[in-house]
Image: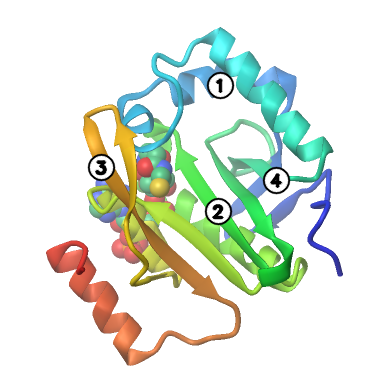
């Protein structure tokens, strides 16, 4: 098994979602989905996200897929209209490690789509790609995203926060991890409960 280059094309189905490759026809849906305040706040997307940004995004997604550097799939419920996106990138083969990311369009949130898509891609990454450690980088103020991470079995690590410049000034990203084959310990569960109640613990 190899994790580089990453498989293309790819279609994953399960948990009530179908993850499929982006297509040029998705441009209008993509722009409608990404031109939105929460996407601007919590992701590195340009804002406003217009047709030009959409075209550049689809082009970059395709290049990343053709070169096998990333997995970047539209989240759908039926293989048709995109409702969000889930990604896997930054593979470090020597450490069998990669980073994942996700977003869901505002009209489709709170239906379990992000959790379903992240669970599916996590399973594929650990099973088919044989990755061992998967990472999420999340602003601790992003309660929706930390809830998704927790729900999918990721745990907050003690790694130092990563500083970054957000649209509302400087902020930082926490690192969450999923380690293949390691069941969550009681300590992990308590730590995640603590992060939910009190925010990041340093
Ligand atoms: C984060 C995001 C992807 C969540 O998508 P979603 O499809 O609404 O999430 P789900 O419906 O799968 O919810 C999964 C869990 O998160 C919880 N959740 C979702 N949105 C929440 C919110 N705004 N506040 C608190 N909890 C939330 C759900 O209740 C559910 O929890 P539970 O089942 O364990 O009780 C979506 O809000 C989004 O796209 N935000 C903007 C982009 C972003 O922040 N991406 C992540 C960057 S790190």
- Find residue 66 and report its image quarter: top right
CB under 8 Å between discs 4 and 2? no
Q: Earlier in the sequence, mark 4 or mark 2?
A: 4
Vertical relation: 156 (above or below) 187: above
* Residue at figure coordinates x 59%, y 44% from the top left: 77
CB under 8 Å between discs 3 and 1? no
Q: Nearer the viewer, mark 2 or mark 1?
A: 2
The 10 Å Cα crowd at callout 2, few under 14, some 14 to 19, many 20 or more, is many
Q: Earlier in the sequence, mark 2 or mark 1?
A: 1
In three-dimensional space, the C-alpha distance between marks 1 and 4, rounded to whole angstroms, equals 21 Å
CB under 8 Å between discs 3 and 2? no
In three-dimensional space, the C-alpha distance between marks 3 and 4, rounded to whole angstroms, equals 26 Å
Q: Which mark is residue 171?
A: 3
In three-dimensional space, the C-alpha distance between marks 3 and 2, rounded to whole angstroms, equals 20 Å
Q: Which residue is mark 4?
A: 70
| Residue 146 x %, y % | 33, 57
The 10 Å Cα crowd at callout 3, few under 14, some 14 to 19, many 20 or more, is some
| Residue 113 x %, y % | 48, 49
Disc 1, ligand 1: is the CB inside 8 Å?
Answer: no
* Residue at figure coordinates x 14%, y 67% from the top left: 197
Q: Which mark is residue 29?
A: 1
* Residue at figure coordinates x 47%, y 25% from the top left: 33
- Find residue 195 and report its image quarter: bottom left
């Amino acid at each position: 098994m190899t994790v580089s280059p990453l498989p293309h094309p790819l279609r994953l189905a399960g948990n009530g979602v179908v993850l499929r490759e982006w297509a040029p026809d998705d441009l209008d849906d993509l722009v409608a989905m990404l031109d939105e305040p929460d996407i601007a706040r919590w992701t590195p997307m340009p804002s406003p996200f217009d047709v030009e940004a959409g075209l550049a995004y689809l082009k970059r997604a395709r290049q990343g897929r053709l070169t096998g550097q990333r997995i970047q799939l539209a989240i759908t419920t039926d293989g048709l209209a995109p409702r969000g996106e889930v990604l896997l990138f930054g593979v470090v083969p020597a450490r069998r490690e990669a980073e994942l990311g996700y977003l869901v369009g505002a009209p489709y949130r709170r239906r379990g789509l992000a959790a379903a898509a992240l669970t599916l891609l996590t399973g594929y990454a650990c099973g088919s790609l044989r990755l061992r450690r998967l990472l999420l980088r999340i602003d601790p103020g992003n309660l929706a995203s930390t809830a998704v991470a927790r729900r999918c079995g990721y745990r907050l690590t003690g790694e130092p926060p990563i500083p970054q410049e957000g649209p509302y000034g400087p902020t930082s990203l926490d690192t969450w991890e999923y380690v293949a084959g390691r069941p969550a310990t009681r300590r992990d569960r308590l730590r995640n409960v603590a992060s939910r109640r009190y925010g990041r613990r340093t």
